[in-house]
């Protein structure tokens, strides 16, 4: 397991997305109201909308372009729409946010 530091928890406003770039990948980070942090690919599968600019509701984000509802937990787009985005495992330790990979 490899963990890569990406941000401080305090730098993320609750329910407001933030884009980070890790190894060339654009990732949208979201601090939920319970301080859990979710990370997904920052690209809607419909028209490549910037998901970090979307509206968060519970554990979903709504694409700012066409309102696709995407799960921050699974990356799946809610029906009747279709598609998915990559999700990333996160870990918060001592106020620091890490992406966790199996590399």
Image (tube, grey):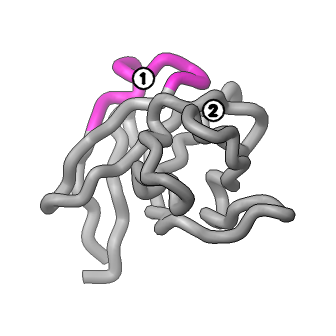
The residue furthest right is 80
Viewer-closest of 77 and 32: 77
Tell me if mark 1 has few (under 14), some (14-19) or many (20+) residues whose alpha carbon lies within 10 angstroms of its own.
Answer: some
Residue 9 in magenta stretch:
yes
Q: Which residue is mark 2?
A: 32
- Left or right, residue 28 beside residue 81: left
Label 1 sits on residue: 12
Residue 39, placed above or below residue 14:
below
Magenta residues span 7-16
Asked if the residue under mark 1 is in contact with the one under mark 2, i.e. CB atoms within 8 Å, the reply is: no
Residue that extends furthest to the bottom in the rendered view of this protein = 103
The residue furthest left is 23
Q: Establish if 64 lies above or below 98.
A: above
Looking at the picture, tell me which residue is in the foreground, 66 or 35: 66
First reached walking from the N terminus: tag 2 or tag 1: 1
Secondary structure under the numbered disc 2 in the rendered image: loop
User: Viewed as shown, does residue 4 lie left or right of 24?
Assistant: right
Residue drawn where x is 51% and y is 36% of the image: 30
Which residue is at 57% across, 32% downward? 64
Please state the horizontal and vertical placement of residue 5, each as a whole percent of the image.
Answer: 23, 47
The vertical placement of 79 against 57, above or below, is below
In x, y percent, where is residue 29?
A: 43, 40
- What residue is rendered at 36% in x and 65% in y? 100
Residue 17 left/right relative to 74: left
Q: Report how far apart the C-alphas of labels 2 and 1 lie in the structure.
A: 10 Å
Quarter of the rendering occupied by the C terminus:
bottom left
Q: Quadrant of residue 59?
A: top right
Figure label count? 2
- Where is residue 9? Give x, y as percent: 40, 28
């Amino acid at each position: 397991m490899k963990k890569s530091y990406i941000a401080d928890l305090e730098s993320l406003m609750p329910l407001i997305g933030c884009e980070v770039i890790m190894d060339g990948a654009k990732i949208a980070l979201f601090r939920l109201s319970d301080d859990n942090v979710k990370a997904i690919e920052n690209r809607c599968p419909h028209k490549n909308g910037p998901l970090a600019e979307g509206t968060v509701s519970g554990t979903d984000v709504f694409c700012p372009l066409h309102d696709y509802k995407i799960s921050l937990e699974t990356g799946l787009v809610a029906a009747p729409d279709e598609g998915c985005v990559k999700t990333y495992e996160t870990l918060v330790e001592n106020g620091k946010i890490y992406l966790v990979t199996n590399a």
